[in-house]
Amino acid sequence: MKIQEIADLAGVSPATVSRVFSHHPNVSAAVREKVFAVARDHAYHPRLSAKQRNVVIITPYTSAYPVQCCVEMILMALTRELPRRGFRIEVLPQDNQERLDRIQFCAAAAIGAEPGDFARWSDRFSVPLVLIDRDARTTVSDVYLVRSDEAQGMELAIADLYDHGCRKIGCIIHGKPGTGNADIRRDAIRASLRKRGLPCDDSLIYFGNDGEYLEIIGKLLRKQVDALFCPGGSGGILCAYALSMFNRRIPDDISLIASEQTFFSRYGTPPQTTLSPDYPALAGAVADVIEARLQGRPAPARTVLPYLLIPRESVRTI
């Protein structure tokens, strides 16, 4: 199908169709939706311009978001990788998405956003959207997933603690059930503990936000845990503070693995063993999807990358 045919069916000019597919800001929402509807009905996918090199990075709009530290490190990796491949970047808070209708861009990447927030993406835009650090059972056209392997990461951390002699591991998963990756992590942690014959009941696995860590760690210490695993958020900092309040030393009294925070984990006392997404690999996978679509090549709907364990001094040696 040619642009002229799309224009005839939509009742607009070929120039208007071209403006719609290039996301020109001076096109009404009604005309845009009409053109996209015709294109979908006839399975038409416009060829993206290789000259258009603007990528929008959509970020959470509140610093209280459960994965804010992860967001910042993913953003740092993207701002290194995408310009290296010749892309220009615009960072857009998620609550300012209406700006997308007023700018021209060849792709977008959303960090830590829920797939449901973009269920109508292909109704509005004809460019790829990459969701980073999230999973979904199904994806819509032109929406791609790039994420870390949560099950592999949780297994990696539990295995390290077990191999170092820990036999009662308390876990605090940052966030709340039903949000982000919290449920996936809980299920993977339980499976990993159960596989080793370790206790894995609800009295040892909690969900929590920043202000709840001190109370939760008090409960876990009363359960006489010998290790803490705290994926997500600022768990490493919060655990170190809470344990100091209970006069417990890391790793002499209790071992700790948390999520990597570039500007704290390695400089803690002691430096913390951490679980970290492979941020450069995530950014590279995002760029690969965008480049594939610009070049008319198929891109994988899902890209899942392994976590990295960074061993330091917060896990006791046997």
Image: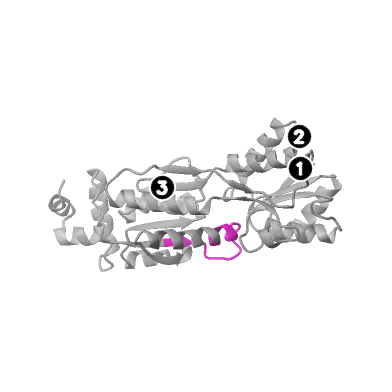
Residue contact at pointers 3 and 2, CB within 8 angstroms: no
Q: Are marks 2 and 1 in contact (CB under 8 Å)?
A: yes
Q: Secondary structure beneath disc 2?
A: loop
User: At 79% across and 56% down in the image, what residue appears?
Assistant: 215
Q: Quadrant of the C terminus?
A: top right
**Label 3 crowd (10 A; few <14 / some 14-19 / many >=20):** many
- Please name which of the two marks, 3 or 1, marks the residue nearer to the observer: 1
Q: Which mark is residue 169?
A: 1
Could you say where residue 275 lies in the image, as x and y percent from the top left?
63, 49
Specify whether residue 231 is painted magenta. no
Q: How is the image coloured?
A: one colour
Residue 225 shown left or right of residue 185 in the figure: right
Is residue 66 rendered magenta in the image? yes
> Which-is-in-front pick, marks 3 and 2?
2
Amino acid type for the residue under numbered disc 2? Leu
Q: Residues within 10 Å of mark 1 (few under 14, many from 20)?
A: many
Quadrant of the rendered structure where residue 261 is? bottom right
Of 51 and 309, nearer the camera is 309
Task: Give the mark nearer the N terminus: 3 vs 2.
Answer: 3
Three-letter code for the amino acid on which mark 3 is drawn: Tyr
Which residue position holds label 3? 144
Residues in magenta? 57-72
Q: Residue at x 35, y 48 (%)?
A: 142
Asked whether, in this view, residue 46 is left or right of residue 196, the answer is: left
The percent position of residue 208, horizontal first and vertical second, equals 69, 53
The residues bearing labels 3 and 2 have C-alpha atoms spaced at a distance of 37 Å
Above or below, 50 relative to 142: below
For residue 286, the mark is none
Instruction: Identify the mark nearer the N-term, 2 or 1.
Output: 1
Helix, strand or loop for disc 1: strand
User: Who comes first in sequence, dot 3 or dot 1?
Assistant: 3
- Residue designated by label 2: 198
